[in-house]
Amino acid sequence: MSLCLIPARGGSKRIPGKNIREFAGQPMIAWSIQAAEKAGCFDRIVVSTDDPAIAEVARGAGAEVPFLRPAALADDHATTLAVIQHALDWCADLPETLCCLYATAPFVRAGDIRAGRALLDDAQYAIPVTSFGFPIQRAVRIVNGRLQMFDPSQYATRSQDLDEAFHDAGQFYWGRSAAWRAGVPPFGPDTAPIRLPRWRVQDIDTPEDWARAELMFQALLARGDL
């Protein structure tokens, strides 16, 4: 059995109501629910929320909302792992695998979700990642109004000689339920990567992120990539 869990708490401060705010013609969370349905690899698609308004929209989009998340797991300090463990504790029949799919992931694709599930045959976790657009070894910071390299020893190293670096795509996390329950860190030696192109990855945490995501979505739609 595989469970798709979509965490969607209320009370977003930087983008009020972002989980159910309209994005490209429908509530943001509906894009994630639709991708989970299209993936065809879940026995249940469950939304974990503390907000009745989000619950109503999620049900209307086709997901289950069998419980409201307790307030202790809905504040700014609640971790994704704690929310996942709460959902697993709720399950009468423990699923073999659980995919935590974010509610604000309009670029997620059903094929990527299916690919992640297949990788769990010999891994505890599978997570989509994308490459940084610039070598992180050459990163700089601003200190007292002046530039300072994080690692000055890399100043003369050619970009092509540096290791390519990746970051979490912020779309979903596949994992075996036993690993989630044991609190095994999802970024480790038994995590398989799902490589995504940078043009299909965008965090949506600020109004600027939202505006950029809308432009990206429109561009992908125009070229038939969605």
Image (spheres, rainbow, N blue to C red):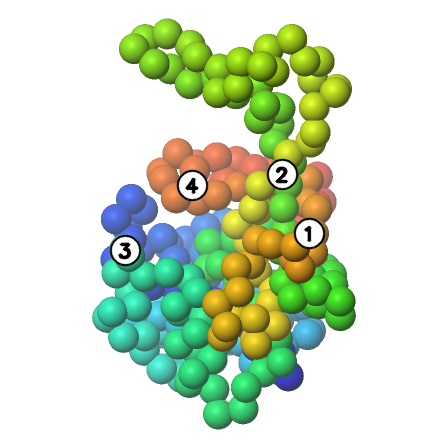
Disc 1, SS: strand
Image disc number at residue 210: 4
Label 4 or label 2, whichever comes before in sequence order: 2
* Tag 3 near tag 4, CB within 8 Å: no
User: Disc 2 residue type?
Assistant: Phe
Disc 3, SS: loop
Q: Which residue is mark 3?
A: 76
* Tag 2 near tag 1, CB within 8 Å: yes
Q: CA distance from mark 2 to mark 1?
A: 10 Å
- Residue drawn 43% across and 83% down? 89
Q: Is residue 25 visible?
A: no
Q: Closer to us: mark 4 or mark 2?
A: 2
Disc 4, SS: helix
Q: Which residue is mark 1?
A: 193
Label 2 or label 1, whichever comes before in sequence order: 2
Q: CA distance from mark 3 to mark 2?
A: 26 Å
Residue 117 position within the rendered picture, expressed as x and y whole percent measured from the top left: 70, 67
Residue 216 position within the rendered picture, expressed as x and y whole percent measured from the top left: 56, 37
- Residue drawn 68% across and 13% down? 157
Q: CA distance from mark 4 to mark 1?
A: 26 Å
Q: CA distance from mark 3 to mark 4?
A: 20 Å
Between residues 69 and 144, which one lies in front from this camera angle? Answer: 144
Q: Which residue is mark 2?
A: 166
Residue 165 position within the rendered picture, expressed as x and y whole percent measured from the top left: 64, 34
User: Disc 3 residue type?
Assistant: Asp
Q: CA distance from mark 3 to mark 1?
A: 28 Å
Between residues 14 and 182, which one lies in front from this camera angle? Answer: 182
Q: Quadrant of residue 65?
A: bottom left
